[in-house]
Image (cartoon, rainbow, N blue to C red):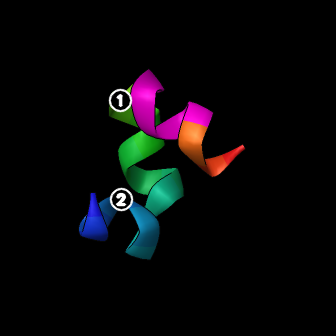
Amino acid sequence: QMIALDGGQHLAWETPDVHGLDE
């Protein structure tokens, strides 16, 4: 999750779950 915040866009591309948190 920490990495997701650091590179939300990068992870969001492969993980829709992160996209929801980013948005």
Q: Is residue 16 above or below residue 21?
A: above
How many circles with numbers are drawn on the protein?
A: 2
Disc 2 is placed on an element classified as helix
Tell which of 15 and 2 is nearer to you. 2
Does residue 19 belong to the magenta stretch? Answer: yes
Q: Residues within 10 Å of mark 1 (few under 14, many from 20)?
A: few
Q: Are marks 1 and 2 in contact (CB under 8 Å)?
A: yes
Q: Residue at x 27, y 57 (%)?
A: 1
Task: List the residue tagged with mark 1.
Answer: 15
Q: Is residue 18 left or right of residue 14?
A: right
Residue at the location (72% across, 43% down)? 23
Vertical comparison of 20 with 10: above or below: above
Q: Closer to the N terminus: mark 1 or mark 2? A: 2
Q: Secondary structure at mark 1?
A: loop
Most extreme residue toward the top, as rendered?
Answer: 16
Q: Amino acid at mark 2?
A: Ala
Using the image as rendered, state which of residue 23 and residue 14 is in the foreground: 23
Look at the image and give the residue range highlighted in magenta.
16-20
Three-letter residue code for mark 1: Thr
Horizontal and vertical percent position of residue 7: 42, 67
Left or right, residue 15 beside residue 5: left
Residue 11: image x %, image y %? 36, 47
Mark number for residue 4?
2
Residue 5 located within the stretch drawn in magenta: no
Q: Residues within 10 Å of mark 2 (few under 14, many from 20)?
A: some
Residue 12 appears left or right of 22? left
